[in-house]
Structures are given as C-alpha cells and as structure tokens.
Amino acid sequence: MEPTPSPSVNTLYSLDVVAMVNTNTIRTAVGIVGNVISFGLFMSPVPTFISIFKAKSVQNFKPDPYIATILNCGVWTFYGSPFVTPDNTLVITINGFGFFLEIFYTSVFFVYSAWNKRRKIMLIFLAEIIFIALLVFLVMTFVHTPKERKVIVGPICIVFNILMYFSPLTVMRQVIRTKSVKYMPFLLSFTNFANGIVWTAYALLKWDPFIVIPNGLGTLSGLTQLILYVMYYRTTNWDEDDDDSANI
C-alpha cells in the first residue's frame, strides 16, 4: 500500500484562511444582530417616555439606567474606534447612536423632574462628559499604540458596562419592596437580557475578554429582572396612584 500523503503546507494554510474568513463572516453577522438588538434596547424605553410626556411628570420612573448608559456608550464608542481596536465598526455605530439617544432620555428626566432632582441629574451628566473627554485626551496623548490603548480602555469599558447592566438594581429593590413591576419596563429588561447574550457570542468568536466579561454579567442581570417580572406581575396594581415624591 502506498502511504497516504500528508497535507501540504499550502493546503493547511488555505484551510486556516477559509476557517478565519468563515469565523469573521459569522462574527459580522452576529454583530449585525447585536446592533439590531441593541437598537431595540435603546428604543425600548419609548413607552416609558410617552407616559412621562402625557403625565408631564417622571412619576416613579428612575433615570439611573439612562444616566449610566451615557457613560457606557461613550467609552465603548472610543474603544471601538480604530485608534484603540481594529475591526470593531459595529461597536462604534450602535454605541454612538446610543450615546446621543440616552442624552435625550436624560434630558426628558431633567425637564420633568423637581429642581433637587434636576441638579443631581445635571451634576452627574457633566461629570460623565468631563470624564469621557479626559479619557480620550489622556489616552490619545500619552499612549501611542492601539494595543496599549486597548489594555487601558478595555477594563474601563468593563466597569461602566457592568454599571449600565446593573443600574436597574435600584428599580429591582423597589420591585421587591412594593411587589410591583409597574416601574420596571418589561421591554428594557428583555432587551438587556438578549443584548448580553448576543454580544457575549460576538466576543467569543474572536476572543475579546473586555466584551465577554461585562456582557456575560449583563445576561445574568437581565435574567434576574425577567425572573422578578414573572414573580411580581400578578401582584402589581397597574392602576395605583403615582407618587412623584420618590427619590431618584
């Protein structure tokens, strides 16, 4: 019997290239799905803000998730830029959109809140904008390679992504205390959960721990919110009077 010829180096190289192309194609497709779901996540509070517009009051809704998301989207937009990481255009597009939309949401809370709450919202917002500007300036000025920038910006993104996903903790505490999910919008919880799953898959296809870690935790946060929604849906009094005296 003649010995089976071993694959040539060129053949193995070609197979590696095909596998890489397929992985990149799948990753791009997952990233597009992630953009669609993230778009849904950013748009999911629309019913909440329609309610605020109609009542001309923020009622018992809390601005925490929207304020936290401004900072999260700002740092992720910087992370996805070619100055920090290559091939992350999909990260830039959706987070850039989310950055400006969350500013709009926060502005609505500012307009329809009492003055003491307005001051708190304004101070936090200004602190976030200053932080983002300083981060971009310092990294671009003193760190000279994308690899080094990624190591610095990535952990910062993890922190603020986790803050965004867990910012509804104040709402969850209110849900447990009142046994009511009236002020924890279902769409926001569901899209948080779906968003975490898709972006975790996106980062696993081309290993990026800075995306995997916060989105894996975000999946758990969204799942917890959905469990609370199921637990307390029946005990929710949807017709109860709104009290705008609650602290944000």
Image: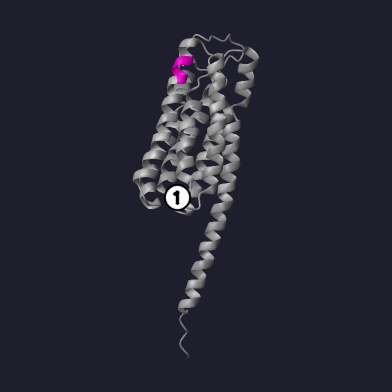
* Pointer 1 local density, CA inside 10 Å: few below 14, some 14–19, many at least 20: some
Q: Position of residue 222 (x, y in %)?
A: 50, 33
Q: Please report the residue visible at 36 percent of the width from the left and 40 percent of the height from the top.
A: 138
- Decide which of 108, 168 is in the foreground and name it: 108
Residue lying at the far bottom of the rendered structure: 1
Instruction: Measuring from the top left, give residue 109's x and y in whole percent.
Output: 54, 19
Query: Looking at the image, can residue 182 be seen?
Result: no
Considering the whole magenta stretch, tell me its main secondary structure.
helix
Q: Quadrant of residue 235?
A: top right
Q: Residue furthest left?
A: 142
Q: Residue at x 38, y 47 (%)?
A: 149
How far across and how far down the image is residue 89, in percent? 53, 48
Residue at 60% in and 15% down: 238
Give the residue number, with chain letter if any, for mark 1.
85
Three-letter code, disc 1 = Thr
**Is 243 situated above or below 226?**
above
Q: Is residue 40 left or right of residue 133?
A: right
Q: Residue 50 in magenta?
A: no
Visible residue check, residue 133: yes
Residue positioned most to the front: 141
Asked if residue 121 is among those painted magenta in the image, a careful observer would answer yes
> Which contiguous range is marked in magenta?
118-122
Which of the two residues, 95 or 54, is positioned nearer the viewer here?
Answer: 95
Q: How many marks?
A: 1
Question: 181 and 188: which one is in front?
Answer: 188
Dot 1 lies on which element? loop
Give the vertical position of 118 relative to 46 (above or below).
above
Q: State the residue at coordinates (52%, 24%).
A: 231
